[in-house]
Amino acid sequence: MNLLVVDDIAINRKLLRATLEAEGYNVLEAGDGVEALQILARETVDAVISDVLMPNMDGFRLCHEIRKSERFHALPFIIFTSTYTSPGDMKLAQTVGADKYLTKPAPIAAMLDALREVMDAQAARPVQSALAGEEADVLKQYSETLVRKLEKKNTELKEALEKLQRAHERIVESNTNLERRVQERTTELETSNRALSQTLSEVKVLNALLPICSYCKKIRDDKDYWQSVEGYISQHTDARFTHGICPECCKREIEMAKNSEG
């Protein structure tokens, strides 16, 4: 048995095709109603399983065109949709002549039961289309359904746009606050770095265990040479020395001079 699966989303067609082929059906694929009618014109098809929301020609219009056709008016037709699920949508599907209406996702058992049911009912469909003389009413319902769906879609898009706008405003505000905090922190770090650089330029620290003579107070360097404290510090730091005399030494020297004179 040949089935025609009509859906504009390729992965949906592939999944349904794999499932039906596993049950022994031969499956053809179409991306919209226009392509489906082209396949029907050249291939033998025993039943159609169609999505509704598709470009070029949707599932309702495809079903309506098939029911108007003298050749295909009795072809079993199953609507399989995830978007058109309201009571009005189901009523329109019945008006255009769909045999069954399934909502995605549906268990494979439900799809197989629907196929058996529509195939059994095929013989009971009248030779003349049940839509004869009702074209205006069908088109009216079709237009009303599309308008309703477009209004709903526009509302959803408007709400989504408003959410995106609010999210964008929050992101902009967060970025502004982040940039301000980064600038403040950068300024703080630059100030700290300048202060640290100034300190390092002014100070060198001797960080070692210094061997010093207990008598002459000379210091032994890492090459085992003994030198004065002034020489060692001048060599290892930026310090410079100027000589003077402390009060205690001054007092001591004066007393020693007096004693030597006496």
Image (cartoon, rainbow, N blue to C red):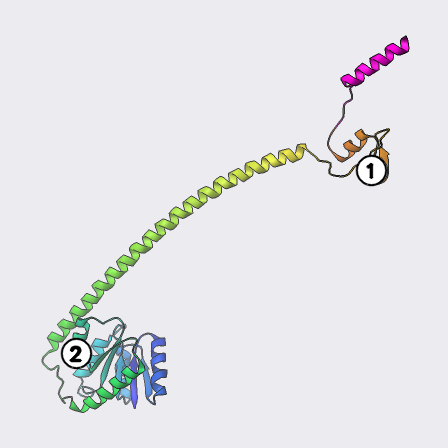
Badge 2 marks a residue whose secondary structure is helix
Rendering coords of residue 33 (x, y %): 26, 78
Classed neighbour count for the residue bearing mark 2: other residues with Cα under 10 Å, few (<14), some (14–19), many (≥20): some
In-front residue for pair 227/145:
227
Residue drawn where x is 22% and y is 87% of the image: 117
Picture layout, residue 94 above or below residue 175: below
Residue drawn where x is 24% and y is 81% of the image: 78
Residue drawn where x is 66% and y is 34% of the image: 201
Q: Quadrant of the C terminus?
A: top right
Rendering coords of residue 98 (x, y %): 19, 81
Q: Amino acid at mark 1?
A: Asp
| Magenta span of residues | 240-262
- Mark 2 vs mark 1: which is more N-terminal? 2
Q: Tag on residue 94? A: 2
Which residue bears the numbered disc 1?
221
Picture layout, residue 98 above or below residue 242: below
Specify the quadrant of the image occupied by residue 108: bottom left
In-front residue for pair 83/68:
83
Rendering coords of residue 80 (x, y %): 26, 77
Picture layout, residue 136 above or below residue 160: below
Badge 1 marks a residue whose secondary structure is loop
Residue 245 lies left or right of residue 164; in this view the side is right
Q: Amino acid at mark 2?
A: Gln
Picture layout, residue 156 above or below residue 13: above
